[in-house]
C-alpha cells in the first residue's frame, strides 16, 4: 500500500543532490563516476523523518530514531569507494539504518544484502527500499556482527557501526579477493576506518584509512547491549522507588478537574507537532475519554487540528464524520458501532464529544477547517465491501458489477472472516488477495474521473477498498501468528492515518485516540522483543518529534470490560497497581490526577530514573483481574514510550449508551438509538 514519501518536498531535490555531490563528495576526492552518479540519483529526503527534510543535503549525519543516525553522505561515499566495487559484485552491509547507504550501494553493485539489529528500522528500511524500487536490496533483521551466512561469500562487506575489532565471522564470509571496510576502535564512539582484503584462505591485508565516529556495533562480535535496551530481558528490579516518586511529585502538574484543567503548558510542549497521539490504559475508563476529549477540543480550537482519528472501523466512524461535518457520504442509514465491543464507542463520553464537534464544525465557515472524525481499524470487511458497492452503484454501474464479482470471493465468509483465513492457509479455499487488490487499484486509477463528482465520497470509498485489501490480508495472517496480524493491523492504521493527513492537505493536523499499546512507541516495550511494532512507533519514525505521544494510567477504580471475547460488558473493579509498576510510583505521589512531562522534564534526573524498565498495565476489551500480572502487565521504559503521561489515581467505568439516553436525537444521528 502506497504511503506518500514526503509531503514537504518543496525544494528542488535534484539540484540539491548535484550540489551535494560537487561540494561535499567530489571536492573531497571521491572520483568513481558510478558512485557520484548514485549520489545524484538517490533522494536522501526519502530516507529521513519528514521534519528533517530541510536538513537533507547538509554535510552531516542526522537522527533517524532509536538513537541511530543516517551517515554523512561523504562518509558513505568514502566507504563505498574503499570497497573497490566491480560490476557483478555482491555486497553485505551491516547496519541498514535508514537504508540510504544500501540504496547507494545497490546502484554500484549487483546485489546488496543488508542486516539491521533494530527491528523497527529494518522493517521501515525494507518497505522504503521496496517502495522506491531498489529491487536488488534485501534487508534482514538480526545481528550483523555475525554476517548473513545464507548469502555468503561476499565480494565486499561494509559495516556502518564501530566495533572493538573486525569480527572473525565477517572475515570468514569474504570471498577470495573480497574487501571489508569498517570502523574499529577501542571505545564505542571513536574509531579508525580500516580496510581488510582477503588474499587467501587465511591471509588478510589490513590498512587504516581515516579517523571516523560511528554509533557502536552492538552484537555477539561487537559491543554489549546498553542497559536501557534490555527491555525484554529478565524483569528488572525497580530501584529507589521513594526517590523516583518524590521526583514525580515535584515535576507533576496537578489536574484539579478535567473540565477546568489548565492545559496551556501542555499545548506549549506540543508546540508545532502535527500529530498528537492520546492513549488510554483501558478501553472502558470515563476519565480517559473525557480528558482526551478536553485536550482534543483545545487542540482544535487553539492549534488548528482538523482530524480526529480513532481506534474504530472506518465505515462506522464515517457515519459519525458525516454527522459531525454534515457531509453527503456515507449515505447508508445503518447504525454505527454495533460490533463487539460496542461500549468502546457507543458511550456517553463519545456522544458528548461528537455533539460538541458537530456544533463547533457548524460554526466554522471554511469546510477545509472543519474537523473530521475517522476510524483507523480494519475489522469491518463486509461493511466496507458494502460501502464500495453502494458508491459504485451510484457512480459507475459497470464498475459495480465487476466489484461484485471480485468481492464475491469473500462473500461466503461474511459471518466468520477468520474462518476464511484458515481455509486459505490450509489450502481448502482460494486466496482472494488478487481480486481485492485489483479492486483497490481500479478505484485509484479512476481517481480523476470519480474525484470530480465528490472528493469526500471518493476518499471514503477508497478507504473502504483499502480496508478490504488490508482486512483480507489480516485474516490470512492470523494463522501465521499474533505478531504478523498485530503488525499488519497497526501498519494499516498508520497508513490510514497518513492517507487522511495527505487527503486533508499539508496543513492538516491529527489527534489520534487509541489504546496505549498502539500509541506508545512499541520499541520501548517488550513488544519489540516479540518483533511487534505499532502506530506510535511508525509515527515516531516517520514524523520524529513532530509527533507527540501521550500515555494514560490509573491505579484503581472501575472499568467497563468483558471477561471473554464476544461476552457482555461488565463493570469490573480494577485492582490496585503492582508494586513494581510505573503506576505504583504515580500512586505513591498521593496526587489525585496530574500531567507528567517526560520528553524534556525540567529535572533531568526524573527522566533518567524512569529509564529503568518497569511493569506497566494494559487493560483492553477483556479484563481478567484474577490473572492480572500474567495477562495485563508488560515491561516498558516509560519516557521512551511516551512524551507525556496523564495520571488519574482513581477512575470509573464509561457510561454505555442505552435507548433512554438517545431519546429525541435526530434521525441522522450515527449511533442510531
Ligand atoms: N547505513 C545507514 C544509513 O544509511 O542510514 C546508517 C547506519 S547507522 C550509522 C548504524 C546502524 O547500525 C544503526 O542503525 C544500528 O542499529 C546498526 N547496528 C548496530 N549494531 C548492529 C549489528 N550488530 N547488526 C546490525 N546492525 C547493527
Image (spheres, rainbow, N blue to C red):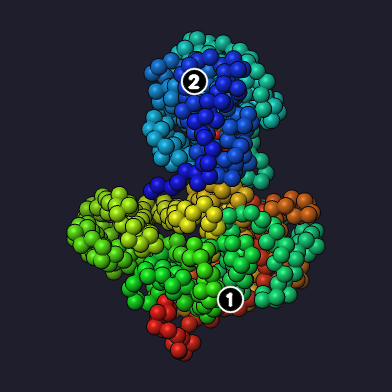
Q: CA distance from mark 2 to mark 1?
A: 59 Å
In percent of width and height, residue 445 lies at 30, 49
In percent of width and height, residue 394 lies at 25, 66
Quadrant in the picture for residue 419: bottom left
- Residue 643: in sight, yes or no? no
Q: How many marks?
A: 2
Image point (48%, 16%), residue name: 33
Position of 311 compared to 59: left or right? Answer: left
Label 1 neighbour load within 10 Å: few <14, some 14-19, many 20+: many
Mark 2, residue position: 35
Q: Which mark is residue 286?
A: 1
Identify whether 7 is placed above or below 470.
above
In percent of width and height, residue 513 lies at 54, 64
Q: Nearer the viewer, residue 274 or 173?
A: 274
CB-based contact (under 8 Å), mark 2 and mark 1:
no
Q: Which mark is residue 611?
A: none
CB at disc 1 and ligand 1 closer than 8 Å: no
Image point (71%, 65%), residue name: 264
> Most extreme residue toward the front, as rendered?
365
Where is the C terminus found, in terms of image quarters? bottom left
Between disc 2 and disc 1, the foreground one is 2
Q: Dot 1 lies on which element? A: helix
Amino acid at each position: 500500500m502506497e504511503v506518500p514519501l514526503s509531503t514537504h518536498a518543496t525544494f528542488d531535490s535534484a539540484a540539491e543532490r548535484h550540489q551535494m555531490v560537487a561540494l561535499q563528495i567530489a571536492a573531497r576526492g571521491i572520483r568513481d563516476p558510478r558512485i557520484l552518479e548514485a549520489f545524484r540519483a538517490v533522494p536522501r529526503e526519502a530516507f529521513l523523518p519528514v521534519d528533517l527534510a530541510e536538513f537533507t543535503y547538509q554535510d552531516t549525519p542526522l537522527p533517524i530514531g532509536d538513537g541511530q543516525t543516517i551517515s554523512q553522505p561523504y562518509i558513505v561515499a568514502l566507504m563505498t569507494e574503499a570497497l573497490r566495487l566491480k560490476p557483478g559484485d555482491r555486497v553485505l552491509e551491516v547496519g541498514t539504518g535508514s537504508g540510504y547507504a544500501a540504496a547507494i550501494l545497490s546502484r554500484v553493485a549487483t546485489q546488496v544484502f543488508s542486516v539491521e539489529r533494530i527491528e523497527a528500522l529494518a522493517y521501515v528500511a525494507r518497505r522504503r527500499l521496496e517502495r522506491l524500487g531498489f529491487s536488488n536490496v534485501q534487508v534482514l533483521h538480526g545481528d550483523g556482527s555475525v554476517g548473513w551466512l545464507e548469502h555468503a561469500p561476499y565480494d565486499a562487506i561494509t559495516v556502518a557501526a564501530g566495533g572493538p575489532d573486525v569480527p572473525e565471522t565477517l572475515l570468514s564470509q569474504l570471498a577470495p579477493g573480497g574487501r571489508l571496510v569498517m570502523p574499529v576502535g577501542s571505545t564505542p564512539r571513536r574509531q579508525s576506518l580500516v580496510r581488510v582484503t582477503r588474499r587467501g584462505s587465511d591471509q588478510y591485508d589490513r590498512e587504516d584509512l581515516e579517523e571516523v565516529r560511528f554509533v557502536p556495533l552492538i552484537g555477539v562480535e561487537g559491543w554489549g547491549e546498553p542497559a536501557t535496551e534490555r527491555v525484554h530481558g529478565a524483569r528488572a528490579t525497580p530501584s529507589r522507588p521513594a526517590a523516583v516518586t518524590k521526583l514525580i511529585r515535584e515535576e507533576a502538574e496537578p489536574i484539579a478537574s478535567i473540565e477546568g484543567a489548565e492545559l496551556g503548558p501542555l499545548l506549549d510542549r506540543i508546540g508545532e507537532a502535527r500529530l498528537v497521539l492520546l492513549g488510554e490504559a483501558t478501553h472502558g475508563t470515563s476519565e480517559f475519554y473525557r480528558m482526551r476529549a478536553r485536550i482534543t477540543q483545545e487542540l482544535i480550537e487553539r492549534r488548528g487540528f482538523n482530524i480526529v482519528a480513532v481506534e474504530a472501523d472506518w465505515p462506522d466512524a464515517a457515519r459519525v464524520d458525516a454527522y459531525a461535518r454534515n457531509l453527503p457520504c456515507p449515505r447508508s442509514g445503518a447504525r454505527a458501532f454495533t460490533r463487539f465491543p460496542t461500549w468502546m464507542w457507543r458511550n456517553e463520553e463519545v456522544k458528548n464529544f461528537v455533539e460538541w464537534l458537530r456544533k463547533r464544525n457548524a460554526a466554522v465557515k471554511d469546510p477545509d477547517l472543519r474537523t473530521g472524525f475517522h476510524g483507523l481499524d480494519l475489522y469491518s470487511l463486509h461493511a466496507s465491501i458494502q460501502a464500495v458497492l453502494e458508491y459504485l452503484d451510484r457512480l459507475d454501474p459497470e464498475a459495480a458489477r465487476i466489484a461484485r464479482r471480485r468481492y464475491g470471493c469473500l462473500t461466503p465468509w461474511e459471518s466468520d472472516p477468520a474462518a476464511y483465513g484458515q481455509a486459505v492457509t490450509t489450502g481448502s479455499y482460494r486466496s482472494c488477495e488478487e481480486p481485492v487488490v485489483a479492486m483497490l487499484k481500479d478505484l485509484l486509477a479512476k481517481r480523476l474521473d470519480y474525484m470530480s463528482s465528490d472528493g469526500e465520497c471518493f476518499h471514503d470509498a477508497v478507504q473502504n477498498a483499502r480496508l478490504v485489501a488490508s482486512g483480507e490480508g489480516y485474516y490470512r495472517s492470523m494463522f501465521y501468528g499474533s505478531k504478523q496480524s498485530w503488525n499488519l493491523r497497526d501498519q494499516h492504521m498508520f497508513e490510514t492515518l497518513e492517507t487522511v493527513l495527505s487527503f486533508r492537505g499539508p496543513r492538516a493536523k491529527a489527534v489520534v485516540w487509541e489504546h496505549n499499546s498502539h500509541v506508545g512507541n512499541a520499541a520501548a516495550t517488550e513488544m519489540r522483543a516479540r518483533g511487534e511494532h505499532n502506530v506510535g512507533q511508525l509515527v515516531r519514525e516517520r514524523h520524529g518529534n513532530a509527533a507527540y505521544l501521550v500515555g494514560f494510567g490509573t491505579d484503581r477504580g472501575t472499568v467497563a470490560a468483558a471477561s471473554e471475547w464476544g461476552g457482555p460488558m461488565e463493570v469490573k473493579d480494577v485492582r490496585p497497581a503492582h508494586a513494581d509498576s510505573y503506576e505504583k510510583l504515580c500512586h505513591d505521589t498521593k496526587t489525585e490526577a496530574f500531567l507528567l512531562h517526560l520528553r524534556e522534564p525540567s529535572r533531568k534526573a526524573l527522566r533518567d530514573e524512569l529509564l529503568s524498565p518497569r511493569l506497566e498495565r494494559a487493560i483492553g476489551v477483556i479484563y481478567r483481574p484474577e490473572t492480572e500480572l500474567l495477562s495485563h502487565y508488560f515491561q516498558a521504559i516509560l519516557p521512551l514510550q511516551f512524551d507525556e503521561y496523564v495520571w488519574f489515581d482513581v477512575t470509573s467505568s464509561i457510561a454505555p449508551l442505552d435507548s433512554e439516553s438517545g431519546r429525541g436525537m435526530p434521525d441522522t444521528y450515527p449511533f442510531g438509538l
